[in-house]
Image (cartoon, rainbow, N blue to C red):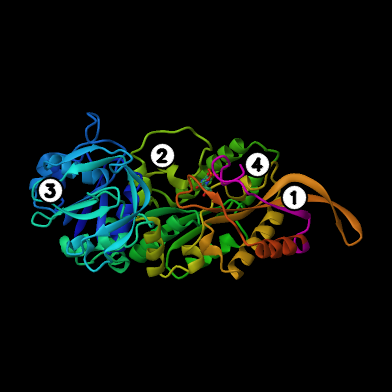
Amino acid sequence: MQKVIVLDFGGQYNQLIARRVRECNVYCEVKPCTTPLSLLRSESPIGIIFTGGPNSVYDPASPQVDPAIFELGIPILGICYGCQLLAHHLGGKVTAGTEDTAREYGKTETYFNTDCKLFKGLPREGVTWMSHGDYMEKVPVGFSLVAHSDACPTVAICDEKRSFYGVQFHPEVNHTQHGCDMIRNFLYEVCGAMGEWTMGDYRDTAIRQIREKVGDGKVLLALSGGVDSSVAAALVAEAVGNQLTCVFVDHGLMRLNEGDEVEAAFKKWDVNFVRANAEALFLGKLAGVTEPERKRKIIGEEFIRVFEAEAKKIGMVDYLVQGTIYPDVIESGLGTSATIKSHHNVGGLPDYVDFKEIIEPLRMLFKDEVRSLGRELGLPEYLVMRQPFPGPGLAIRVIGEITKEKLDTLRLADFIFRDEVAKAHLEHSMNQYFAVLTNMRSVGVMGDGRTYDYILALRSVTTTDFMTADWTRIPYDVLDRVSTRIVNEVPHINRIVYDITSKPPATIEWE
Ligand code: XMP
């Protein structure tokens, strides 16, 4: 399979570049800029993309490349810092820009020479997204200038003989008009891409590889009902059928009907599906617990115990499947940061279970690719498009003490919220939305009588990475319908509030 390598120089858009390449049906991987040349050569990429980065090429500590990379005969596209690096190494001159000499930030009108392959078939003028302090004062020998802006004469350069291209702007971000077409041109016009990367092909190859690896061995998977573990399960189910056992720990903290939906989705495969109904156990352990971190710890530990007990019944397994996805792989290289909340995932299982090897069939896929793979495998849309749901489930959305009654109240209210969002066709503009049952009661009036019932909060965020998030501007009439229905249909709620805090300073979940 043809491959492009994205060499990461620390730019904030490294993953986005890789996704854009894959959206053009070309497989690509992100590698650190320190990757040895021998390794790069052995992978025979059809093209290399240098990402942007926060440094200046003249800073002695700035990340560099082995200059021999320019002798490999492989097309290179340098973006922002990557472009400056290209110019710097090939004999050009990069200098610190000033207001007048081309330090640029934000949307910038740019003029292109469409004879250059990178801009072939595109308008001669358009907006690009700039974010650079340095600029190319002198272009290297053999290169032509193929784009400029009002402030900067050297916005893009190319040496078509050697297939080297550099752009000061970021074609990968949406603000750059036709940015994706430029990346597509690099792949198809310059690198000779054939567009082999499709989810149908990925599915077939992955199934073949899983079969070869597993042989007649036993496979175990912890199914959480989330998108990643569901798609991983479907893929392995398709590959090895009843050699797979899916253990679904139902902690009783799922949303309305969620456990049944997950179970129903896997009926079509001949897999061993174990649903460990552990609601009573979890609620027992959580009784009287109000502190969020304690709730998380209890749920994390119990989850592992239940899973372990089920795994023991199955006996020694050969393979454990995990739903690790590509952003986790890329990000695992980054440093540590402060613990805001101790996240509970099924990811921490291997220490506790007897198995020989791990299979991570989604390891090279981005989230949107995982979803399209799920569709290829015939998973229902509600599972494939499921919004993120925290491992501790509704336990961290019932503020304070958790009881079965409170959970049922929240489940119903949350369902109504999701139902109205779906009816208003807003689900794709809201990345995560849910209800939170506060532990505060207030006075209301219903019919002719006084009520003293719980306050329910609605939360919805718009985000790409869930690290930062903005609260969603839901239309008032939708909020109104949700509020009216909840107070009428759900007992013990008499007041609804909408959370209008972004992250930071708030987090997405309330606990
Ligand atoms: P916060 O509340 O930290 O949430 O802004 C960020 C995203 O992570 C999800 N989340 C979790 N996911 N286990 C998970 O698998 C957890 O313990 C957990 N806690 C929060 C949250 O729903 C949001 O998408």
Left or right of residue 341: residue 167: left
The image position of residue 89, as x and y in percent, is 14, 40
Left or right of residue 194: residue 397: right
Q: Nearer the viewer, mark 4 or mark 1?
A: 1
Q: What element does badge 2 sit on?
A: helix
Q: Amino acid at mark 3?
A: Arg
In this figure, which residue is indicated by the disc labeled 2? Answer: 351
User: Residue visible at 54% across and 55% down?
Assistant: 432
Mark 1 vs 2: CB contact within 8 A: no
User: Which stretch appears magenta?
Assistant: 488-511
Residue 494 within the segment the image draws in magenta: yes
Q: What element does badge 4 sit on?
A: helix
In this figure, which residue is indicated by the disc labeled 4? Answer: 286
Q: Which mark is residue 455?
A: 1
Give the CA separation, mark 2 to mark 4: 24 Å
Residue 90 within the segment the image draws in magenta: no
Viewer-nearest residue: 475 or 308: 475
Left or right of residue 470: residue 327: left
Viewer-nearest residue: 125 or 200: 125
In this figure, which residue is indicated by the disc labeled 3? Answer: 41
User: Residue visible at 52% across and 67% down?
Assistant: 264
